[in-house]
């Protein structure tokens, strides 16, 4: 980060009447810190991504299981409703 800040500082120093400026140094530090933070975030993203992919797959499996359970319960309830319907039809 400091290397990048010194580079930006040097560029600003040469463009502003050949003298050093606090703006160039501060701008270099700010841009360098943004660059550093961005690199860290990208690194963390690549470290976390495989875990997120696995978690996503696990959640999809669980959702599929819930759908299958819902369908089997729904089928069972419909069967009981038909049985009860036939029972009440014969009773009346």
Image (spheres, helix red, strand yellow):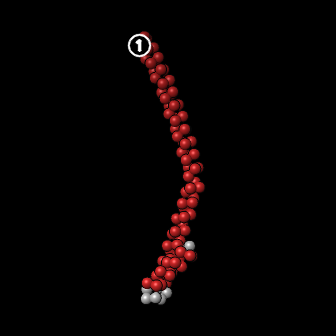
Q: Is residue 15 above or below residue 80?
A: below
Q: Residues within 10 Å of mark 1 (few under 14, many from 20)?
A: few
What residue is at 52 percent from the left and 35 percent from the top? Answer: 64
What residue is at 55 percent from the left and 57 percent from the top? Answer: 45
Place residue 43 in its image quadrant.
bottom right
Q: Quadrant of the C terminus?
A: top left
Q: Quadrant of the N terminus?
A: bottom right
**Whole-percent x, y for residue 60 in the image:** 52, 40
Secondary element at tag 1: helix
What residue is at 48 percent from the left and 20 percent from the top? Answer: 80
Q: Is residue 51 above or below residue 33?
A: above
**Mark 1 sits on what residue?**
89
Camera-side residue of 41 and 70? 41
Q: Is residue 85 above or below residue 72?
A: above
**Whole-percent x, y for residue 30 in the image:** 50, 74
Residue 23 in sight from this viewpoint: no
Total marks in image: 1
Camera-side residue of 68 and 81? 68
Camera-side residue of 57 and 91? 57
What residue is at 57 percent from the left and 45 percent from the top? Answer: 54
**Whole-percent x, y for residue 86 in the image:** 43, 14
Residue 38 in sight from this viewpoint: yes
């Amino acid at each position: 980060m400091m290397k990048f800040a010194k580079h930006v500082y040097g560029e600003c120093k040469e463009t502003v009447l050949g003298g050093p400026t606090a703006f160039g140094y501060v701008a270099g530090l700010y841009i360098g810190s943004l660059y550093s933070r961005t690199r860290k975030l990208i690194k963390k993203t690549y470290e976390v991504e495989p875990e997120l992919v696995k978690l996503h797959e696990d959640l999809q499996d669980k959702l599929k299981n819930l759908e299958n359970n819902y369908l089997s319960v729904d089928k069972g309830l419909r069967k009981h409703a038909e049985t009860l319907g036939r029972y009440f039809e014969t009773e009346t």
